[in-house]
Amino acid sequence: MKKLEDIVSLCKRRGFIFPGSDVYGGMAGTWDFGPLGVSLKKKIMDAWWDYFVEKREDIYGIDAAILMNPKTWVASGHTTTFADPLVECKECKGRFRADKIANGVSESVTTEEFLNTHTKCPVCGQENWGPIRKFNMMFRTHVGAVLPEDNEENKELAEKSIAYLRPETAQGIFTNYKNVLDTLYPDLPFGLAQQGKAFRNEISPRDFILRDRECSQMEIEYFVNPETWEENFEIMRQMEHDFLENIIKLPQENIHELEVSAEDRAHYSKRTIDFMFDYPNGQEELMGLAYRTDFDLKNIEHESGKSMSYRDKITGESFIPHVIEPSIGVERLFLAILSTAYTEDEINGEKRIVLKLPENLAPFRFCVSPLLKNKPELVEKARTVYKALRQKYRNVTWDDSGNIGKRYRKQDEIGTPKCIVIDFDTLKDDTVTVRDRDTTKQIRTKIDEL
Ligand code: GAP
């Protein structure tokens, strides 16, 4: 059975992920990606971009600012509805998400429903609760040189300077829909894709990188004729499965679709399927697929006074497109990949940890080593092989630390599919050993044929 603690420990030990601000004791809900983590994260994001944007004719990229005019969040409904049910323990003052600590209640749980569950405080074990309050999860900041504490007169100005860190990347797409329409003149259906940071002041960040206060999203808003929303929803659903199962290589049996009930859906959605994944600590949402209707464009039209209509070039009909939105968190995908790849086995009676990452995602594809570090002729030959491979593949690493056994263990743990070793035979016949990560089998091959 895979344990989350083992994955967390591997991530820190091998430089994938460190707790955010670690040196100062950390900061809950934030994580820093180290050299190997950045490499894997970038490969995941590039694979998504390649599949959904580069390979398609109908989806275009966008990279909008994180700070947006506050009207954005009024129009989107986030200032009023992007809130979680917060409950406070009157004994220990601990604050929790009511729907996460009580069994069988939804995000819209009322105080009465919550009290009826007779939930005990997870910290002090008492059952003495305050009322449920709606806690808005957007991070607030001030834009410009006006701060509320400056003086009394500035209070009003300071109120006006309030801005939010975006809680979803989607709004940067919706607010640019018209710009793209007026510059590229795309026909429906077409999509806009964006990758970037999103911020949520989660009441209880948890499960390593699964629920963060700062995360990265990869989102597509796919604009469609309202009459065709169902077929486009289905197309997106199939594409998501194809991407997750055939490009990212997540096991099909670990992905489960959950049709989200009307009361649990986000305020903008008329249909949502959550793609749930079997993580080490249980099933959790990996990504969401939502039918956002014309909710966002209509509200932007209302708030900005600018038309969001699309005019069909053939029929001449004008209407506001509807939207299908697949949205996935990079960290959740990262953790799904790691928990799939993390394996413990035994080789010649010795326990080993191996990350069986797909070749397209592994931080390094090859590791090159001289058998012995103190033999200059081996090192020189190995450097030649290393340089040649790097020219061809880039993600090739060099390792001459410790003995060969230790190097293999290390490369297994970071998921390097092939280790190439230069030994004394190489000097005679230009052959090297190539060791396979998963089987640990070694073959000899000519350098030219690598
Ligand atoms: N634009 C739609 C949207 O943001 P969401 O279901 O709130 O919908 C989409 O988020 C995805 O973003 C989730 O399925 C998840 O993968 C990721 N995500 C959301 N909140 C997260 C958090 N606090 N930490 C990590 N990932 C998160």
Image (spheres, grey):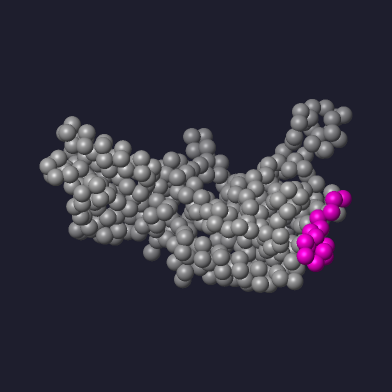
The quadrant holding residue 161 is top right
Q: Is residue 313 magenta?
A: yes
Q: Is residue 169 above or below residue 126?
A: above
Q: Which residues are magenta?
A: 305-320
| Residue 270 vs residue 241, the one in the foreground | 241
Q: Residue 442 in the image: x percent, y percent?
A: 21, 55
| Residue 37 vs residue 124, the one in the foreground | 37
The quadrant holding residue 379 is top left
Query: Residue drawn at (87%, 29%), measured in percent from left and top?
Result: 153
Query: Residue drawn at (29%, 55%), measured in percent from left and top?
Result: 437
Q: Residue 358 in the image: x percent, y percent?
A: 40, 57
Q: Main secondary structure of the magenta part?
A: loop
Q: Is residue 381 left or right of residue 221?
A: left
The quadrant of the image that shows the N terminus is bottom left
Query: Residue drawn at (27%, 43%), measured in percent from left and top?
Result: 368
Q: Is residue 360 left or right of residue 256?
A: left
Q: Residue 11 in the image: x percent, y percent?
A: 42, 48
Query: Residue drawn at (82%, 38%), measured in percent from left and top?
Result: 159
